[in-house]
Amino acid sequence: MGDRLVSLAAGTVLDVGPADAVEVAAAAGWPAVGLWFDPTTWTDATTLEVRRRLDATGIVALDIEPIILGRGGDGGERLLDAAATLGVPFVLMASGGADDDRVTARLAELAAYAGANAPGVRIVLEFLPIFSVSSLGQAVGIVERVDRPEVAVLVDTLHLARSGGVPADLATVDARLLPYLQLADASASAPADLAGLRDEALYGRLLPGEGVLPLEAVLRAVPDVPVSVELRSSTLMSAFPDPTERAAAVLAATRSVVGSV
């Protein structure tokens, strides 16, 4: 896979806790992992244990998620604090049901907090067709309005396709705003409504190369950045109930796609 860093996204192994996810990723051969921050269970002890596991395995924590707006308190400052302590470069944020003005205002608040308290950490705004920030152009517009070095945009190949985007759209975005990608594949037939889109995103993703999305074109459009592989799939979990075996299967599929670009 050349020099491109690949990371096992937190959503692929949500059946284990964040510290155990580090062990799973390392055992399966991944060089990096994503972390899931549950504000109801994450404590200072969790941060210390995750740090210990990262140090013991030598793998990198690429991102930590999620900050989701429009659902009451979002815990963004706590998540940024954890990222800073762990040396995680990216914090993933999504709009939930918040409108553009609220997303812009909150992103600016968190960017200022990161600048003062979490140097080196960037907040990436992910667009999803099931959320209020639903397209690449909308996400880029918000990030450009905030206009701070601590903010960027996260492109998930599934969401790009299901929102009507194509790889060529990425060429219109300042490369500095696209610091990494999320990769997943899907079938040619898109769900017909929001409920179907949500179900696909949470349970129906396909392994890289198993579907028809233009993954190689996306990788060529955004070269030399890390790739996080987001595989939420009930089929995959049934086929590989053991999280380490599942992670290994996802890595093998990822290598076949990323290594060809």
Image (cartoon, rainbow, N blue to C red):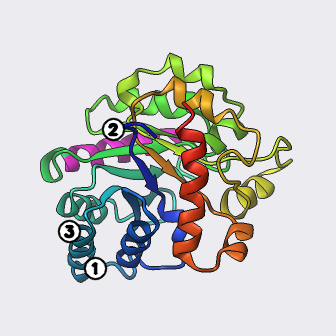
Residue drawn where x is 15% and y is 47% of the image:
119
Mark 1 or mark 2, whichever is nearer to me: 1
Kindly identify which residue carries mark 1.
46
Residue drawn where x is 67% and y is 50% of the image:
130
Q: Are marks 1 and 3 in contact (CB under 8 Å)?
A: no
Left or right? Give the position of 166 relative to 40: right
Span colored in magenta = 99-114
Q: How many marks?
A: 3
Q: Which of 152 and 228 is in front in this view?
A: 228
Residue drawn where x is 51% and y is 39% of the image:
100
Mark 2 or mark 3, whichever is nearer to me: 3
Residue 146 on image: x %, y %:
34, 32
Residue drawn where x is 48% and y is 58% of the image:
9
Q: Element at badge 3?
A: helix
Query: Which amino acid is tagged 1?
Result: Thr
Q: Do the residues labelled 2 and 3 touch (CB within 8 Å)?
A: no
Kindly identify which residue carries mark 2.
151
Query: Which amino acid is tagged 3?
Result: Asp
Q: Verify whether residue 253 appears in magenta.
A: no
